[in-house]
Amino acid sequence: MENVATQPMESEVPIRHSSGAKCPELKNIQKVMDLYIDGVRNGNVASLQQAFHPQSSMFGWKGKELYITPIQGLFDYIAATPVPSKTGEPTTFIITSIQVNGYAANVEMAMDSYHGHDFMDYFQLVKVEDRWWIVSKTFHADPHDRTS
Protein backbone atom coordinates (compact mmCIF):
# COMPACT_ATOMS: atom_id res chain seq x y z
CA MET A 1 0.00 0.00 0.00
CA GLU A 2 1.34 3.43 -0.92
CA ASN A 3 0.87 6.52 1.23
CA VAL A 4 1.57 9.91 -0.34
CA ALA A 5 1.40 13.14 1.65
CA THR A 6 0.73 16.42 -0.08
CA GLN A 7 1.43 20.11 0.41
CA PRO A 8 -1.38 22.67 0.00
CA MET A 9 -1.33 25.35 -2.68
CA GLU A 10 -3.67 28.29 -3.11
CA SER A 11 -5.83 27.08 -6.00
CA GLU A 12 -5.14 23.37 -6.26
CA VAL A 13 -4.04 20.47 -4.13
CA PRO A 14 -1.06 18.81 -5.81
CA ILE A 15 0.25 15.32 -5.17
CA ARG A 16 3.92 14.56 -4.72
CA HIS A 17 4.34 11.93 -7.41
CA SER A 18 6.29 8.75 -6.81
CA SER A 19 8.26 6.93 -9.45
CA GLY A 20 6.32 3.72 -8.73
CA ALA A 21 3.73 2.01 -10.89
CA LYS A 22 0.86 3.60 -8.92
CA CYS A 23 1.72 7.13 -10.07
CA PRO A 24 -0.86 7.14 -12.92
CA GLU A 25 -3.51 6.01 -10.42
CA LEU A 26 -2.62 8.86 -8.07
CA LYS A 27 -3.13 11.36 -10.88
CA ASN A 28 -6.54 9.87 -11.70
CA ILE A 29 -7.58 9.87 -8.03
CA GLN A 30 -6.46 13.51 -7.77
CA LYS A 31 -8.74 14.37 -10.71
CA VAL A 32 -11.71 12.87 -8.85
CA MET A 33 -10.81 14.81 -5.71
CA ASP A 34 -10.48 18.01 -7.77
CA LEU A 35 -14.08 17.45 -8.92
CA TYR A 36 -15.14 17.17 -5.27
CA ILE A 37 -13.25 20.35 -4.33
CA ASP A 38 -14.78 22.26 -7.25
CA GLY A 39 -18.23 21.04 -6.29
CA VAL A 40 -17.94 22.16 -2.68
CA ARG A 41 -16.00 25.40 -3.27
CA ASN A 42 -18.22 26.61 -6.14
CA GLY A 43 -21.54 24.86 -5.51
CA ASN A 44 -21.04 22.83 -8.67
CA VAL A 45 -23.34 19.84 -8.19
CA ALA A 46 -22.47 18.55 -11.68
CA SER A 47 -18.82 18.19 -10.58
CA LEU A 48 -19.91 16.31 -7.47
CA GLN A 49 -22.05 13.98 -9.59
CA GLN A 50 -18.99 13.21 -11.71
CA ALA A 51 -16.95 12.38 -8.60
CA PHE A 52 -19.43 10.21 -6.66
CA HIS A 53 -20.75 6.85 -7.76
CA PRO A 54 -24.58 7.05 -8.00
CA GLN A 55 -24.90 4.52 -5.15
CA SER A 56 -22.51 6.40 -2.83
CA SER A 57 -23.40 7.32 0.71
CA MET A 58 -22.26 9.77 3.35
CA PHE A 59 -21.97 9.38 7.12
CA GLY A 60 -20.59 11.78 9.68
CA TRP A 61 -20.85 14.21 12.53
CA LYS A 62 -21.14 18.00 12.18
CA GLY A 63 -20.99 19.32 15.70
CA LYS A 64 -23.59 17.31 17.61
CA GLU A 65 -25.60 16.31 14.52
CA LEU A 66 -25.24 12.90 12.90
CA TYR A 67 -25.72 12.70 9.14
CA ILE A 68 -26.49 9.42 7.37
CA THR A 69 -27.65 9.84 3.79
CA PRO A 70 -27.41 8.60 0.23
CA ILE A 71 -25.09 10.95 -1.66
CA GLN A 72 -28.07 12.89 -3.04
CA GLY A 73 -28.27 14.43 0.44
CA LEU A 74 -24.86 16.05 -0.12
CA PHE A 75 -25.90 17.28 -3.56
CA ASP A 76 -29.07 18.84 -2.12
CA TYR A 77 -27.11 20.48 0.73
CA ILE A 78 -24.54 21.98 -1.65
CA ALA A 79 -27.27 23.28 -3.97
CA ALA A 80 -29.17 24.92 -1.11
CA THR A 81 -26.38 26.61 0.87
CA PRO A 82 -24.04 29.55 0.24
CA VAL A 83 -20.70 28.51 -1.26
CA PRO A 84 -17.27 29.78 -0.18
CA SER A 85 -16.41 31.16 -3.62
CA LYS A 86 -19.35 33.57 -3.30
CA THR A 87 -19.38 34.29 0.46
CA GLY A 88 -15.65 34.86 0.77
CA GLU A 89 -15.32 32.28 3.54
CA PRO A 90 -11.61 31.26 3.45
CA THR A 91 -12.24 27.54 2.98
CA THR A 92 -9.10 25.45 2.44
CA PHE A 93 -8.81 21.88 1.18
CA ILE A 94 -5.70 19.87 2.07
CA ILE A 95 -5.27 16.24 1.07
CA THR A 96 -3.30 14.77 3.94
CA SER A 97 -3.09 11.18 2.74
CA ILE A 98 -3.80 8.92 -0.22
CA GLN A 99 -3.51 5.15 -0.06
CA VAL A 100 -3.92 2.98 -3.14
CA ASN A 101 -4.03 -0.79 -3.38
CA GLY A 102 -5.15 -2.24 -6.71
CA TYR A 103 -8.63 -0.94 -7.49
CA ALA A 104 -9.30 0.48 -4.01
CA ALA A 105 -8.15 3.77 -2.50
CA ASN A 106 -8.61 5.97 0.56
CA VAL A 107 -8.20 9.72 0.60
CA GLU A 108 -8.03 11.79 3.78
CA MET A 109 -8.74 15.50 3.44
CA ALA A 110 -8.85 18.40 5.87
CA MET A 111 -11.36 21.09 4.93
CA ASP A 112 -11.06 24.13 7.16
CA SER A 113 -13.48 27.01 7.51
CA TYR A 114 -16.57 25.65 5.77
CA HIS A 115 -19.86 27.00 7.10
CA GLY A 116 -18.18 27.77 10.42
CA HIS A 117 -16.74 24.27 10.86
CA ASP A 118 -13.43 22.47 10.31
CA PHE A 119 -13.91 19.07 8.68
CA MET A 120 -11.84 15.93 8.51
CA ASP A 121 -13.12 13.93 5.54
CA TYR A 122 -12.40 10.30 4.65
CA PHE A 123 -13.21 9.15 1.13
CA GLN A 124 -13.25 5.59 -0.10
CA LEU A 125 -12.77 5.15 -3.85
CA VAL A 126 -13.11 2.19 -6.17
CA LYS A 127 -11.97 1.86 -9.77
CA VAL A 128 -14.77 0.56 -11.99
CA GLU A 129 -14.39 0.14 -15.76
CA ASP A 130 -11.20 2.25 -15.95
CA ARG A 131 -12.66 5.06 -13.84
CA TRP A 132 -12.26 6.05 -10.19
CA TRP A 133 -15.42 6.84 -8.18
CA ILE A 134 -15.91 8.03 -4.63
CA VAL A 135 -18.17 5.35 -3.13
CA SER A 136 -18.43 6.73 0.40
CA LYS A 137 -17.58 9.75 2.47
CA THR A 138 -17.28 9.81 6.24
CA PHE A 139 -16.50 12.95 8.18
CA HIS A 140 -16.23 14.70 11.51
CA ALA A 141 -16.63 18.48 11.78
CA ASP A 142 -16.00 20.71 14.76
CA PRO A 143 -17.21 24.31 15.01
CA HIS A 144 -14.53 27.01 14.89
CA ASP A 145 -15.39 28.06 18.45
CA ARG A 146 -14.66 24.80 20.24
CA THR A 147 -15.25 26.30 23.70
CA SER A 148 -19.04 26.04 23.40
Image (cartoon, rainbow, N blue to C red):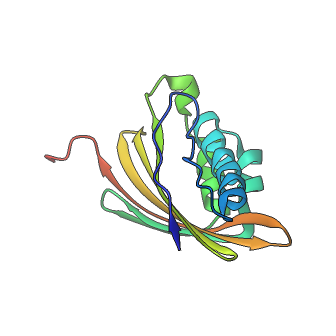
Residue at image position (63%, 62%) is 20
The answer to which image quadrant residue 133 occupies is bottom right
Q: Is residue 85 left or right of residue 45?
A: left
Q: Is residue 31 left or right of residue 86?
A: right
Residue 103 versus residue 63 in the image, above or below: below
Residue at image position (61%, 60%) is 73
Q: Is residue 98 left or right of residue 79?
A: left
Residue at image position (69%, 52%) is 27
Q: Is residue 127 left or right of residue 36?
A: right
Taking depth in this image into account, of 123 and 144 the one nearest to the observer is 123
Which x, y percent locates residue 143?
29, 46
Which x, y percent locates residue 101?
61, 75
What is the count of numbered marks? 0
Which x, y percent locates residue 128?
80, 73
Residue at image position (74%, 67%) is 53
Residue 80 versus residue 65 in the image, above or below: above
